[in-house]
Image (tube, rainbow, N blue to C red):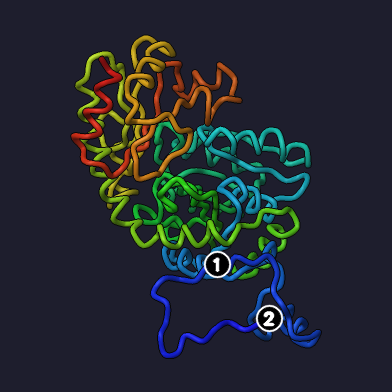
Amino acid sequence: MTTPLLGSTTPLAPALFQSSVYAIPDLDALARIYSAEEPGFIYARDAHPNAHLLGITLAELEHASWSLVCGSGMAATTASLLALVRSGERVVASNCLYGRTSQLLKQELSRFGVATTFVDCNDLEAVRIALQTPARVLQVETMSNPLCRVIDIEALARLCESHDCRLVVDNTFATPVLAKPLELGAYLVIESLTKMMGGHGDVTLGVVSGRDGELLPRISQIMSLWGLASNPFDCWLTARGLSTLELRVKAATANAAALADWLAAQPGIIRVVYPGRPDHPDHALAKRVLPRGLGNMLCFELEGGRDAVNRFMRGSKGVPFCPSLGSTQTTCSYPAMTSHLYESPAEKKRQGITDGLIRLSVGIEELGEIQMEMAKGLK
């Protein structure tokens, strides 16, 4: 079957290739595709046109040599760790990572003989000491989930280089609009495309980007063997979302900065956590690491704990409780029972994840509309 000719016209929108398998002319053609002598696709778990095209765009955004799209942000994290670490080796990780990443390191990689040391990555001396014992990977986040701790990527990259370690940065909260970790010395950068990159709450994807060409086939193979592949439709939707990424990030960041100050003046709020506020512990560092803006994520803590959170959620129907982030609409989440559900009470307390803490993903609505909706739950 052939595709109807389009004459001299070209579709303005990228095509969707919703196929799981591709017809190949003969065995000689198959051999040439396998050896990369000619382009082509065989089976969508290994590669497909929409992931390939999206990867090209993402590599340009990240200033990477390559980007591989996979089924989720956690799939991207898993693929990078499996490519870099073997049994008997060690990972050093930030002690304020996304809860599922910590769980992956503590529970899953440990089953394969990979040890993880968690350390305060805002304490460079503590990181240096941790790296004195050989480690293959330093796993961090540009801005931590949920409390937006900002790290000095350049300083950590120098430490990794001097200790033969690979710096892997989850850049989901910042996106490449606000930070490009590869330019600052990271070895790999991970994004959950499910979030701000996709931007509309309708995809589940992740990406790993890097500059080391020798690592590319290794991660490609892991994605196929472990079943971490993406699907064409989500890739197509994400490519569409990327066309407005910078506009959305700028609008949501401006809203978040204004909303943080507004929240700080509201009754019943104990604290507001946003890197753009002078009371944030990493305020000065954040302005240096993220000169184009400090993102759309913030947290606030309510007096009255869980009961107050329930009242807020029931009152602020226009700010839905959705345990994700990065959509065009402002949404809230509750870290104690979502992103960090599986952390111990002591660990939640150490990180500052209290029963009254709400994480807010600020959208692109009119600021007054967001304030009006939130005020309904703050009464």
Residue at horizontal 74%, vertical 78%?
Answer: 34
Q: Is residue 353 above or below residue 139?
A: above
Of all residues shown, which one is farthest toward the bottom?
8
Q: Position of residue 101 (x, y in %)?
A: 59, 38
Q: Which residue is at a point 60% across and 52% down the rendered structure image? A: 71
- Compute the Cα span from label 1 to label 2: 18 Å
Residue at 26 percent across and 48 percent down: it is 251
**Furthest residue in direction right, as rendered:** 27
Task: Identify which residue, 37 or 114, lies in the foreground.
Answer: 37
Identify the residue position indicated by label 1 in the image.
Answer: 50
Location of residue 205 with respect to 285 vertically, above or below: below
Q: Is 303 displayed left or right of 371 in the figure?
A: right
In this figure, what is the number of numbered marks? Answer: 2
Residue type at mark 1 is: Asn
Instruction: Determine whether the residue tagged by mark 2 lies in a helix, strand or loop.
Output: loop
Nearest the camera: 100 or 369? 369
Binning the other alpha carbons within 10 Å of mark 2 as few (below 14), some (14 to 19) or many (20 upward) gives few
Please state which of the two labelled residues, at mark 1 or mark 2, is closer to the viewer: 1
Is the residue marked by circle 1 packed among few (<14), some (14-19), or many (20+) residues within 10 Å?
A: many
- For the residue pair 119 and 235, the one nearer the viewer reads as 235
- Up-down relation of residue 37 to residue 101 (above or below): below
Image side of residue 309 versus residue 283, left or right: right
Res 58 visible = yes
Helix, strand, or loop for circle 1?
Answer: helix
Quadrant location of the C terminus?
Answer: top left
- Name the kind of residue labelled 2 in the image: Ala
Quarter of the image where the N terminus is located = bottom right
Q: Which mark is residue 36?
A: 2
